[in-house]
Image (cartoon, rainbow, N blue to C red):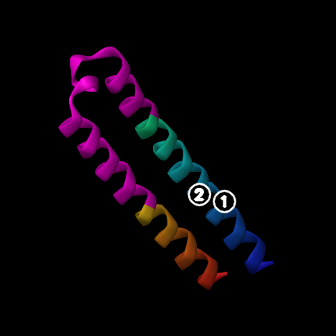
């Protein structure tokens, strides 16, 4: 029974992380598409670095949660 509760909390946590990740991607895509910064290679590099760091952090959390369960 305890494992089921842990899985429930884990799935809620992962849903929140996934929503934040999707929103971050949408914001970066909107900035690239609708602003002059989208043509700036430095801005593209910065956006890539930010999303890469967040992706690595998300993978770290997934691995960490996988070990707990």
Q: Residue beneath label 1, please?
A: 11
Q: Could you tell me which residue is drawn at 24 percent across and 45 percent down?
A: 46
Instruction: From the top left corner, tell me how far across and down residue 51 is, in percent.
Output: 38, 49
Q: Using the rendered view, name the quadrant where residue 62 is placed.
A: bottom right
Instruction: From the top left corner, tell me how far across and down residue 22 is, in percent.
Output: 51, 40
Mark 1 and mark 2: Cα distance apart in space: 5 Å
Residues packed near mark 1 inside 10 Å, few (<14), some (14 to 19) or many (20 plus): few
Q: Could you tell me which residue is drawn at 63 percent across and 65 percent down?
A: 10
- Judge from the rendering whether residue 6 lies leftward or rightward of residue 53; answer left or right: right
- Judge from the rendering whether residue 38 lies leftward or rightward of residue 14; answer left or right: left
- Judge from the rendering whether residue 20 lies leftward or rightward of residue 4; answer left or right: left
Q: Is mark 2 on a helix, strand or loop?
A: helix
Instruction: From the top left corner, tell me how far across and down residue 59 is, in percent.
Output: 51, 67
Q: Could you tell me which residue is drawn at 71 percent across and 69 percent down?
A: 7
Magenta-colored span: 26-55
Where, quadrant-wise, is the N terminus in this rendering? bottom right
Q: Does the magenta stretch include residue 34?
A: yes
Which residue sits furthest right?
A: 1
Q: Nearer the viewer, residue 37 or 65?
A: 37
Q: Does the magenta stretch include residue 50?
A: yes
Instruction: From the top left corner, tell me how far across and down residue 67 is, in percent.
Output: 61, 84
Question: In the image, is residue 62 above or below residue 19?
Answer: below
Q: Is mark 1 on a helix, strand or loop?
A: helix
Q: Residue beneath label 2, please?
A: 14
Question: In the image, is residue 46 above or below residue 63?
Answer: above
């Amino acid at each position: 029974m305890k494992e089921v509760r842990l899985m429930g909390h884990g799935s809620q946590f992962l849903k929140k992380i996934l929503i934040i990740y999707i929103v971050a991607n949408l914001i970066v895509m909107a900035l690239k598409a609708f602003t002059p910064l989208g043509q700036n290679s430095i801005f593209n590099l910065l956006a890539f670095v930010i999303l890469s760091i967040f992706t690595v952090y998300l993978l770290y959390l997934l691995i960490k949660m996988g070990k707990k369960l």
